[in-house]
Image (cartoon, rainbow, N blue to C red):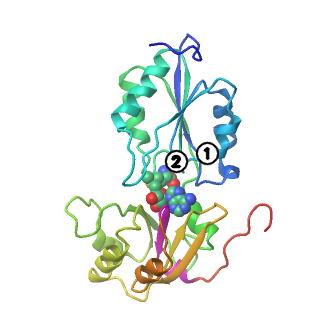
Amino acid sequence: MSDPAIPSGPGQVILVGGGPGDPDLLTVGGLRALREADVVLYDHLAPLACLDEVRPGTLLVDVGKLPRGRQTAQEDINALLVKHARLGATVVRFKGGDPFVFGRGGEEWQACAEAGVPVRVIPGVSAAIAGPELAGIPLTHRGLSQSFTVVSGHVGPDHPASLVDWTALATGGGTIVILMGVANLAEICAGLIARGLDPATPAAIVARASLPDSRVVTGTAESLPALAAAAGVEPPALTVIGAVAGLGLPPSTSLEGD
Ligand SMILES: C[S@@+](CC[C@H](N)C(=O)[O-])C[C@H]1O[C@@H](n2cnc3c(N)ncnc32)[C@H](O)[C@@H]1O
């Protein structure tokens, strides 16, 4: 069924990373893509205020996947991208952070490629990097850390579905960044300590980075789970474990300076 808002002609899909939430962290290219879009399929972690920038008549489709909440199946999202592009639309797939950091951008690109739909990618500022730095935690720091690893905490170290080498993380000495790990934080920290991580390693959890109600809770690998639970930290939040989390820098001031 065709949609009157969608022009005919060759369509395309643009995978846009929206950054961690603050509209100021959307790229210039991402903003231009939104302004040119006929259709926008968006997630809840994308900076939704930026949707005010679309042209009148642009079709906005909420395909958000809430943790443990309403789900739009990935296959359905892929099918929508292909359908609208084949009808001639410029379709923006608008996501939080970067589309290829736990963003399933690769799967969407594959689906489009298989359907012969051209894809443009506009990378975004990943919360994995921006979140710590806005909280005053550089992921690398001379003399403290020469590497960082971003892992999914969706399943913990003892879960058979985890593909992460938790022992290498625990003993590697680099900075560990855990996304999607709030629910499993206690299991993750205990699992890292059991695999050789010093329990006194500095650690921090950063919730809603870049947003006005952002919060940071600091502690150690041993103490952080209880501190985060006591503070009522909820997703979206990420955890940083490593010496850099103990630098003690204050969180960044906002662009407005408040
Ligand atoms: C499905 S992953 C998507 C990551 C995203 N593609 C990126 O590059 O930032 C969602 C997870 O990213 C982290 N996250 C996303 N936005 C965040 C924010 N503003 N503050 C803290 N963590 C965030 C949380 O760990 C959340 O569970």
Q: Nearer the viewer, residue 143 or 82?
A: 82
Q: Is mark 2 within 8 Å of ligand 1?
A: no
| Mark 1 Cα-neighbour bin, 10 Å: few <14, some 14–19, many ≥20 | some
Which structural element holds mark 2? loop
Q: Position of residue 239 (x, y in %)?
A: 47, 70
Which structural element holds mark 1? helix
Give the residue at x 44% y 81%.
224
The amino acid sitting under disc 2 is: His
Give the residue at x 58% y 55%.
20
The quarter of the rendered structure image containing the C terminus is bottom right
Give the residue at x 44% y 13%.
1
Q: Nearer the viewer, residue 64 or 245?
A: 64
Tag 1 near tag 2, CB within 8 Å: yes
Q: Position of residue 211 (x, y in %)?
A: 64, 60
Q: Position of residue 178 (x, y in %)?
A: 42, 66
Q: Is mark 1 within 8 Å of ligand 1?
A: no
Q: Is residue 241 magenta?
A: yes
Q: Which residue is mark 1?
A: 48
- Which contiguous range is marked in magenta? 235-246
Where 13 falls versus 245 (above or below)?
Answer: above
Q: Is residue 28 left or right of residue 76?
A: right
Where 95 falls versus 218 (above or below)?
Answer: above
Q: Which residue is mark 2?
A: 44
Give the residue at x 63% y 61%.
210
